[in-house]
Image (tube, grey):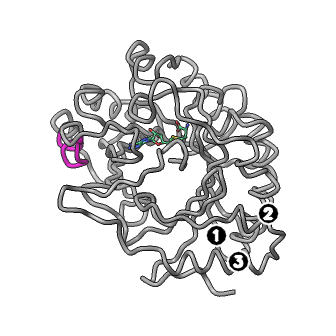
Amino acid sequence: MDALIDAHNRRINYLRISITDRCNLRCQYCMPKEGVSQFGHAEVLRYEEILRIAKVAVARGITKVRITGGEPLVRKDVVQLVSQISRLEGIEDLSMTTNGALLAEFAPALSRAGLKRVNISMDSLLPEKYRQITRGGELSRVWAGMEAARAAGMAPIKINVVAIAGFNDTEIVNFARLTIPDPIQVRFIEFMPIGFFSEWRPQQFLPSDEIKRRIESHRPLVPASIHKNGHDGPARLFKFPGAAGEIGFISPISDHFCQSCNRLRLTPDGKLKTCLFSDEEVDLKNLLRSSCRDEELEKELCDAISSKPLRYGYTGSGIKRCHRPMVKIGG
Ligand code: SAM
């Protein structure tokens, strides 16, 4: 079977599956205090529907799958879904993005079910500030989740930090220092204007180069050599000399990686998105619920891939933002 290659010669092998738009946190930059209106039960893909899409996609050349949300660990029976996806022939990498609040409870079962690794979102190292940013989150639970993931054998553990000026930028060096004794990967992600709820303002934006400069004013960084070209997915990787872990920079805004984008996203309500910043979506749920054959699903997938845009649009006033909020896409 031919690999999935789009019209711009990019090999598409990565599917991010958001299994819910519900979340147990209310991060200030992601959603309003009252949350966002949630999909009704019937709107959300059932596990057998998700599995069917995953199966067709993996058979067609997707090798890497990430489970995300909302918060994936709030959906009932998530371990069962992980177990089913991990057994699909052709899957090489199965991971999850989580806020970590429930990870201590789930890590052993997730690992047994075949989850290889987790990315944990943590935007402050200060318990009170973390509580504020997440509107109620307990930082100690995230640390406990991380330890549980490690004890369960998941590796590498990656910590995602969305760097926002005036919000958590004073903690950049402290986050970077975590990698000195600990073999973790701390990744700084540029704040993106996603969704109409997001209060993204240009003055809050911190480009990766500035984050890196601030870290280097503390200690020099050297490229991390263990990954090909210093890249791990879209992250550019560095480390402090002699450190156990690594520091990554993900720069969707200042150095967008559209040219090498290999991803597709499946939203909780069954829409396939080929570009995070675009409002274009392909409705797979309707197709599935009209008793389609696998061949039709595969065709829809391939058609979507051939129309994957080369890059998202810049408008005169900056970056074009998609309307769907991150919590309903799956970050
Ligand atoms: N609940 C899970 C979590 O917290 O990791 C998964 C979903 S969350 C939407 C996924 C990631 O998207 C988190 O790391 C979050 O910080 C990030 N995110 C949300 N809004 C963002 C934005 N506007 N720019 C950059 N990252 C964002």
Tell me the crowding category of disc 2: few under 14, some 14 to 19, or many 20 or more residues within 10 angstroms, Cα based: few
Residue 212 magenta: yes
Split into 4 quadrants, where in the image is the N terminus? bottom right
Question: Can you identify the residue that label 1 sits on?
Answer: 62
Question: Would you say 194 lies left or right of 18 here?
Answer: left
Expressed as whole percent of the image width and height from the top left, the position of residue 281 reads 54, 64
Residue 298 badge: 3
Could you tell me which residue is drawn at 63 percent across and 74 percent down? 301
User: For the residue with label 1, is its CB less than 8 Å from the closest atom of ligand 1?
Assistant: no
Q: Which of marks 3 and 1 is in front?
A: 3
Q: How much space separates mark 2 and mark 3, taking CA atoms?
A: 15 Å
Residue 319 badge: none
Expressed as whole percent of the image width and height from the top left, the position of residue 130 reads 42, 20
Q: Nearer the viewer, mark 2 or mark 3?
A: 2
Could you tell me which residue is drawn at 62 percent across and 35 percent down? 22
Question: Can you identify the residue that label 2 sits on?
Answer: 289
What range is drawn magenta here?
205-214
The answer to whether the residue labelled 3 contacts the one labelled 1, judged by CB atoms less than 8 Å apart, is no
The answer to whether the residue labelled 2 contacts the one labelled 3, judged by CB atoms less than 8 Å apart, is no
Disc with the residue nearer the chain's start (2 vs 3): 2
Q: In this view, does 84 lie above or below 89?
A: above
Expressed as whole percent of the image width and height from the top left, the position of residue 64 reads 61, 62
Query: Which amino acid, mark 2?
Result: Arg
Tell me the crowding category of disc 3: few under 14, some 14 to 19, or many 20 or more residues within 10 angstroms, Cα based: some
* Count of numbered circles on the image: 3
Query: Which amino acid, mark 3?
Result: Glu
Q: What element carries label 2?
A: loop
Disc with the residue nearer the chain's start (1 vs 2): 1
Q: How much space separates mark 1 and mark 2, taking CA atoms?
A: 23 Å
Task: Locate residue 328: give its quadrant.
Answer: top right
